[in-house]
Image (cartoon, rainbow, N blue to C red):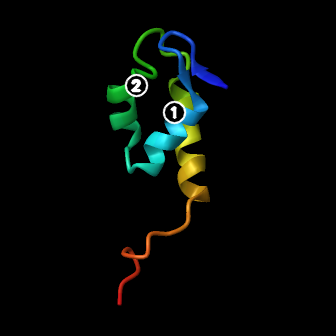
Amino acid sequence: MYVCLCKAVTQQQIEQAVEQGDSYAQIRQKLGVGTDCGCCGQSAKQMVREHISRMPPCEFAVAS
């Protein structure tokens, strides 16, 4: 599904960027989401939050 029509950014592209460790700011810079008309900005941020919450915790983040 397209999230940003201005830059032709898809949900899959955003999810892949999150899985590579990119923040919303980095995704915005790399893919251009939310930088033209701005209509997709809030949706893209929510998508990033939701995808992060579904990802398994990093094994290195657990303190020993």
> In the displayed image of the protein, which residue is found farthest to the bottom?
64
The picture places residue 34, in percent across and down from the top left corner, at 45, 20
Residue 31 horizontal/vertical position (percent): 40, 25
Mark identifier at residue 25: none
Q: Are marks 1 and 2 in contact (CB under 8 Å)?
A: yes
- Residue 63 quadrant: bottom left
Task: Look at label 1 and name its amino acid.
Answer: Gln
Q: Quadrant of residue 46?
A: top right
Task: Quote the CA–CA distance across marks 1 and 2.
Answer: 8 Å
Identify whether 33 is placed above or below 37: below
| Image quadrant containing the N terminus | top right
Q: Secondary structure at mark 1?
A: helix
Helix, strand or loop at label 2? It is: helix
Residue furthest out toward the right = 1
Residue 12 position within the rendered picture, expressed as x and y whole percent measured from the top left: 58, 35
Quadrant where the C terminus sits is: bottom left
Residue 17 is drawn in which quadrant? Answer: top left
Q: Which residue is mark 1?
A: 13
x, y (%) of residue 20?
40, 49
Q: Is residue 24 above or below residue 30?
A: below
Residue at coordinates 40% horizontally, 16% vertically from top-left?
A: 35
* Classed neighbour count for the residue bearing mark 2: other residues with Cα under 10 Å, few (<14), some (14–19), many (≥20): some
Residue 14 placement, left or right of 23: right
Which residue is depicted at the point 51% across and 33% down? 13
> Which residue is the site of mark 2?
31
Looking at the image, tell me whether mark 1 or mark 2 is earlier in sequence order.
1
